[in-house]
Amino acid sequence: MTRPEGRRTRVLLIFGGRSAEHDVSRATAVSVARALDPDRYEVVPLAITTDGRWLFANEALRAIEAGPAALPEAFAVAGEPVSDLGDLVARGEQAVAPATAGGSLDVDVVLPLLHGPYGEDGTVQGLLELAGLPYVGAGVVGSAVGMDKVMMKRAFAACGLGIARHLAFREGHDADELRARVEDELGYPCFVKPANLGSSVGVSKARDRAGFDAALALALDFDEWVVVEEAIAGREIEVAVLGDDPPEASVPGEVVPGDEFYSYADKYEDDAAELLAPAPITPAQTDEVRALAVRAFEACRGEAMARVDFFLEEEGAARGFLVNEVNTIPGFTPISMYPRLWELSGLPYAKLIDRLVDLAFERHERRRRRAGRQRSE
């Protein structure tokens, strides 16, 4: 499947989802819908509830059709249910058309704007692969590795990238042994994070044993795997990566947290963090971190887009740039770091979305040529 000629490209915009980042996704979807040129794109919004139901987002569709002035801050997760996801999977190369009271889906490409588990982690990507639909962003492997902080760090280490000292823990194992290792190998303060989540949800800074026990309990509320990391006294540098082969890196930016660390409230509620773009670092550091961003992206089998986050340690051990994580569906409002960095790099928001859609079609065509091939006798 390639981008259609002679008509608008029909984009399935999926938002909401089952993760704790549900509301972030609803706001991101509005920003993307506003940027999609109505002369080139027809937007079909699809919402996923927090309990996993898929809905034709009729209210969102009416707002989109009414024009930018009618768009809310975040789309409502409401509408008629999609009757049978099996229809989507059984699609093959044909139109997606589950029969429902709310209408039907007949789309060219999918924009899954789902942050966190059950959307950014390869689950929805696998469904779209089975359905034979082009979609924006990383594939199944890159999405899964980019979501799971344990596997991500293993990939970074295997590729020789500098990372923070850390320990992994699975629920049901010996928490006392973990605490002893933290105190012996990492020390306080340290950060305790759910392995499969983003937007700093469930993340705590533990300063002592009691704080650690509380932080571990909180992280385990969100995931059965937890990562404990040393606290790094360093600057937070971010780079946006775009493309596949070869990927390109944007100019870097810097996050100056308004909170003690770049927390969920700091990102989405308090508006206290300062985003410096471009980052005030030297030209040599700029070249270095851009090259490291591409290496980190490729280590996780990234495709199409990701924001790569670093710590820049300039004091103490002075280890320089340490890779923190790769985000395969980064924040995508116009003021989010990923589109801001590409704007500074010469690619405006609307053109960035165009490029991502083109990349989705290009990858789909590459994969389609190999699908179902059999060994020749």
Image (spheres, rainbow, N blue to C red):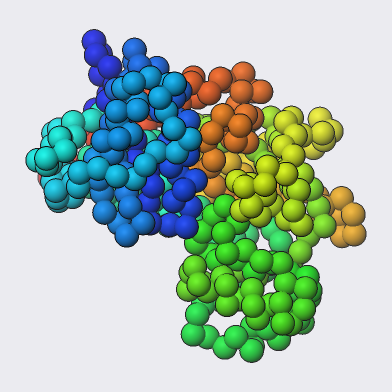
Q: Is residue 317 above or below residue 301?
A: below
State the residue at coordinates (48%, 69%). Answer: 223
Q: Is residue 59 left or right of residue 337?
A: left
Residue 113 appears anywhere in the view: no
Q: Is residue 142 left or right of residue 169?
A: left
State the residue at coordinates (75%, 34%). Answer: 276
Residue 117 appears anywhere in the view: yes
Place residue 26 in its image quadrant. Answer: top left
Q: Position of residue 157 (x, y in %)?
A: 62, 59
State the residue at coordinates (81%, 30%). Answer: 283
Between 359 and 78, which is closer to the camera in this rendering? 78
Q: Position of residue 83 (x, y in %)?
A: 14, 48
State the residue at coordinates (60%, 46%). Answer: 268
Q: Is residue 343 above or below residue 360?
A: above
Q: On the rendered image, what quadrant is the N terminus found in?
A: top left
Q: On the rendered image, what quadrant is the C terminus found in?
A: top left
